[in-house]
Image (tube, rainbow, N blue to C red):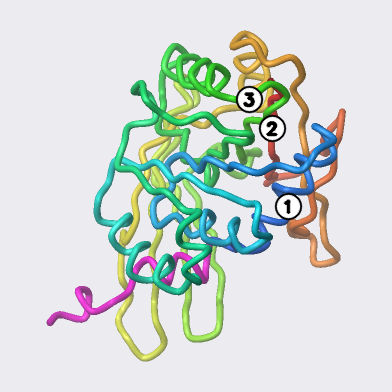
Amino acid sequence: MSARNSFDKYAAYAVAVQSASYDARVIRRIYRELVRREPTLMREDFCSTFQLCCEWVKLDRTKQAVGLDIDPEPLAYGRSHYLAQLSSSERERVNVLQRDVLRAGAPRADLICALNFSYFVFKQRSTLSAYFRRCRRVLESGGMLLVDLFGGPHYGEPAMDTKTLPGLKYWFEQEFFDPISNYTRFHIHFKPRGRRIQKRVFSYDWRMWSIPEVCDLMREAGFKDVVVYWEGTGRNGRGSGRFHRRERGESCSIWVAYVAGIA
């Protein structure tokens, strides 16, 4: 087996990029603040290994989760690595479907999440609008659609972000950016300690959507209220990981935010 084949790319991604347990708690907090009730059924779109679904059902015995993704490989990984670690009661409350989020048949939910900028794969306004409208139709009254997004002048030209973690180095490379279309391509590279760099482990062809565009499209899709949660800045000058409802952002080279649409 080659070094690349033996490299666990999903485990590396979970360490370098995701914090599913923290995300589940943040999502629940935002829902409680905006909807004023406790969410039960969370649908994770573009769920990949559906680690968020597994962390969601751990929150309490009332929580249920549905994951949707068209790629069978990460779904299989999630079943063997995350679903298998749950208790029998928790596993019964997770339902994973290999399904296109734009096709009919997606289940109703209290809460729909499209995170890790996954919906950036929709490059046309009409496609993103259709996705938001589908979400609105299957949300329970008072339900919430939550998406995240990032931007800033740092991403206006090719760039490379680097993070060093225990036993692992991570690069997030922006290969190009077209300011006319806002189309862009990113790659994730990893270097495990004592091994060769694993290049282009994940690649993304995206459109960089802005906060005003996403807010406008949610309103046009019929969401009654649209709210932005802005990430604060830590003492080291980087994102703090703490998000608060804001009417105005800050001028910074890199920013991350959530946008919540209330049905």
Q: Is residue 11 magenta?
A: yes
Looking at the image, residue 113 lies above or below residue 74 = above
* Residue 178 placement (x, y as % from top left): 44, 29
Q: Which residue is located at x 62 percent, y 27 percent?
A: 210
**Distance between mark 1 and mark 3 Cα atoms:** 20 Å
**Image disc number at residue 259:** 2
**Image disc number at residue 140:** 3
Predominant secondary structure, magenta span: helix
* Residue 212 placement (x, y as % from top left): 68, 20
Quadrant location, the C terminus? top right
Q: To which quarter of the image does residue 74 belong?
A: bottom left
Magenta stretch bounds: 1-17
Foreground of the two, 82 or 16: 82
Q: Nearer the viewer, mark 1 or mark 3?
A: 3
Counting residues from the start of the chain, the first of labels 1 and 3 encountered is 1
Marks 2 and 3 in Cβ contact (< 8 Å): no
Marks 2 and 1 in Cβ contact (< 8 Å): no
Residue at mark 1: 26
Foreground of the two, 144 or 204: 144
Looking at the image, residue 196 lies above or below residue 259 = below
Give the residue type at disc 2: Val
Give the residue type at disc 1: Val
Q: Which residue is located at x 19 percent, y 74 percent?
A: 5
Give the residue type at disc 3: Glu
Q: Is residue 94 magenta?
A: no
Counting residues from the start of the chain, the first of labels 2 and 3 encountered is 3
Foreground of the two, 178 or 67: 67
